[in-house]
Amino acid sequence: GAVVSQHPSWVICKSGTSVKIECRSLDFQATTMFWYRQFPKQSLMLMATSNEGSKATYEQGVEKDKFLINHASLTLSTLTVTSAHPEDSSFYICSARDRGGSGYTFGSGTRLTVV
Amino acid sequence: GNSVTQMEGPVTLSEEAFLTINCTYTATGYPSLFWYVQYPGEGLQLLLKATKADDKGSNKGFEATYRKETTSFHLEKGSVQVSDSAVYFCALTHLGQNFVFGPGTRLSVLP
């Protein structure tokens, strides 16, 4: 079946540094990638939607200059948390939609802790 | 907009008990409905799904039926195991758009 590889699975970084999270579709072309964030004991909330080769669309309240999304190819999308702060500590997870638009595959998630 | 409501729990059951987690949704048209499971420290795993009214999704002993008339997609299992302890998310997607998740229900199964 379709697989999305998400790395790293966990990361601890110092406040003020940047962290890049990668999601790679291994056996299909991900024309659309969704990025979600999950705070402890809460549900997943959509942060942004990116289509290959175009700028991401961010949900209300999500700072596009802080959460940089790049979807330069049909198999790779990245989320960079810039100048991370402790309040950015969360579980980030991507979801890729295939070219046909009918299949969705989630990555395994990245737990970010900013100290 | 679209939304999903589910019982938040936590739900604590003894092994072999019957499980029901209620889920209702609000959406225009005919969304696809899903149940995802998240084990401690892990990502989301698709448990089951249904794409049209009256469809029944099933997997690993879990079942849910897409009820258009009651806009519901309740999750059931006849006999839970300790290994079923996890957080369960009801979700929908419509017309190829992003998922909308319910708040999640934490299930603890005691031996």
Image (tube, rainbow, N blue to C red):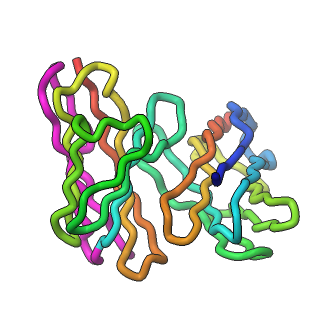
Q: Residue at x 69, y 71 (%)?
A: B30
Quadrant of the snapshot with the C terminus of chain B: top right
Q: Position of residue A114 (x, y in %)?
A: 24, 23
Q: Residue at x 41, y 48 (%)?
A: B43
- Res A59 quadrant in image: top left
Furthest-right residue in this view: B69
Furthest-bottom residue in this view: A100
Q: Position of residue B109 (x, y in %)?
A: 67, 38
Q: Position of residue A17 (x, y in %)?
A: 12, 27
Q: Residue at x 25, y 21 (%)?
A: A85
Q: Residue at x 66, y 47 (%)?
A: B81
Q: Is residue B111 visible?
A: no
Residue B23's place in the image compared with B14, above or below, is below
- Residue range of the region highlighted in magenta in the rendering: A1-29
Q: Nearer the viewer, residue A40 or A82?
A: A82
Residue B97 vs residue A17: left or right? right
Residue A7's place in the image compared with A13, above or below, is below
Q: Is residue A23 visible?
A: yes
